Amino acid sequence: MIVKPITMAEMRKTGAIPKSPTQAHQERVGKGNYNRFKHLMDKRDRSQSEGKRQRGNSDDVFETSNKTPRLDEELLVSQVAKAEHELKVAKSAMDECMKVADGCYSANDGQMGTAFYKLTEVVKHLITNQEWITSVVVDSRKLADQVSKEQVKVNKVVDNVMNYAGAAQGRGNDSQAKKVSKPPPSEEDKSRRRIRQAINKAEKSSVLFGIDMGDVPTINKETLARKLTIDLHKKAKKGAPESKYSEKQVEEMTDDLLTCASLDFLGSGTKIYKNKYNDKDTNNGKFCTMPVKMMFKDKKERILAEQHLRKVCSVKCSTPYPKGLRTLISSLIEEAKRVKQGHFILAKVNVEKLTVSALASENNSWTDLNITRDIPLNILDRFETMEADSDMEAENTVEGEKEPRSH
């Protein structure tokens, strides 16, 4: 389960502190799905109030749904023809009326003549406006038909071009097709890809050991994230004088480190700390702990974070390589220690060549001891192989989504 880290600044801002299970339970009492009116359910009248809208049948929704009506071309043509005929009749009647009015009335007499003249002007404007509306309807339908015909022509051209391109590609040389096509990867190539995928993923993460996560076993991941933050800040303050930083500076550095990582707790819950390699460890039995994996964006961020964790916080860190590779590295380091006794040994993993070589610390620099081991292609177990395949499939899916689509 991946958990987002909590910084000390966020904890101080919200006042969040690790709470015991009893306190958390007491705070949840009366919240959630608890119904304090449950004992009234049998006696309460469940009839609807007077102002509440009655709920109809579900079928009414489909019956009253509005749909866009489909345009009937034949009906539109017949209606436009009738409108034009009516306009012609109205216009001819208007002309006859004006001829009669010119002999009977005067437009400037200020009485019935003026009123009759104004009425004829109104009718004339209405007839003109109706002619414009009819003309707009006819022109819009002609334009729509023209656009649809041009679109059909464009689609035909595009189809012809695509068919020609496909035929040309099919007529390609057989020799060129053989050069372009890639053979399917062999089982050896697949194994190499899986190992590289597992190593690259491991080198983006760091596993922390010996973190103080309280006096009692805990399984809540959010609580464990807060306890991790508290312990890292506590250890950073202790290491601040030796690292020549102030307490405020190490606090900002530790919060910055936490914001760059995501957490994965390796186990179902914390257990009492016990160093199986050293029975005289003073921390044995003093607190509960569990390994914590911190996952970063890339290898460079992980290296910078480990430098702060080791030098300032004095936390033991390890790269979570596959189990078989860790065994190979341990045997290589033991061999290198026998060759170069009393020196620090570093195992360097070469992802491209799939080899592991040993380096020794000498005169403030790393010296190659010329001890190299090849990484076997069957070093991953069944679960690690499945995880590598799923990670590669997820990366290929993301890369495919980022590529621009051709139209």
Image (cartoon, rainbow, N blue to C red):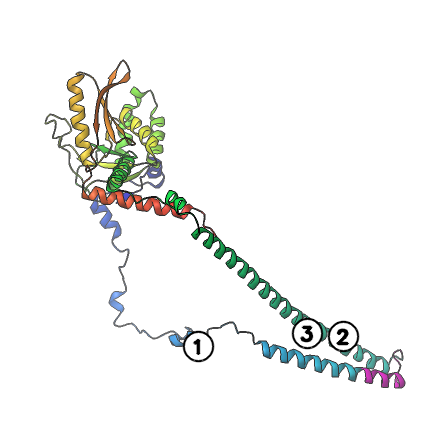
Q: Give the crowd class for mark 1: few <14, some 14-19, many >=20 residues within 10 Å.
A: few
- Given contact means CB atoms under 8 Å apart, are the residues at marks 2 and 1 in contact? no
**Residue indicated by mark 2:** 125
Residue 31, image x, y percentages: 28, 55
* Quadrant the N terminus occupies: top left
Is 249 drawn above or below residue 389 in the view shown? Answer: above
Q: Is residue 160 left or right of residue 107?
A: left
Q: Residue at x 68, y 74 (%)?
A: 134
User: Which sits in the foreground, 299 or 62?
Assistant: 299
Task: Please tell me whether mark 2 sits on a helix, a strand or a loop.
Answer: helix
Q: Earlier in the sequence, mark 2 or mark 1?
A: 1
Q: Could you tell me how far apart the alpha carbons at marks 2 and 1 are, in whole angstroms?
A: 43 Å
Q: Amino acid at mark 1?
A: Glu
Residue 156, image x, y percentages: 53, 61
Q: Residue at x 25, y 65 (%)?
A: 38
User: Which sits in the foreground, 145 or 327?
Assistant: 145
Q: Is residue 52 left or right of residue 369?
A: right
Q: Amino acid at mark 2?
A: His
Residue 318 lies in the magenta stretch = no
Residue 211, image x, y percentages: 22, 33
User: Which sits in the foreground, 351 or 290?
Assistant: 351
**Residue indicated by mark 1:** 63
Span of residues in magenta: 95-108
Residue 99 lies in the magenta stretch = yes
Q: Quadrant of residue 176?
A: top left
Q: Earlier in the sequence, mark 3 or mark 1?
A: 1
Q: Could you tell me how far apart the alpha carbons at marks 2 and 3 are, in whole angstroms?
A: 14 Å
Task: Please tell me whether mark 1 sits on a helix, a strand or a loop.
Answer: helix
Outermost top residue: 363
**Residue indicated by mark 3:** 134
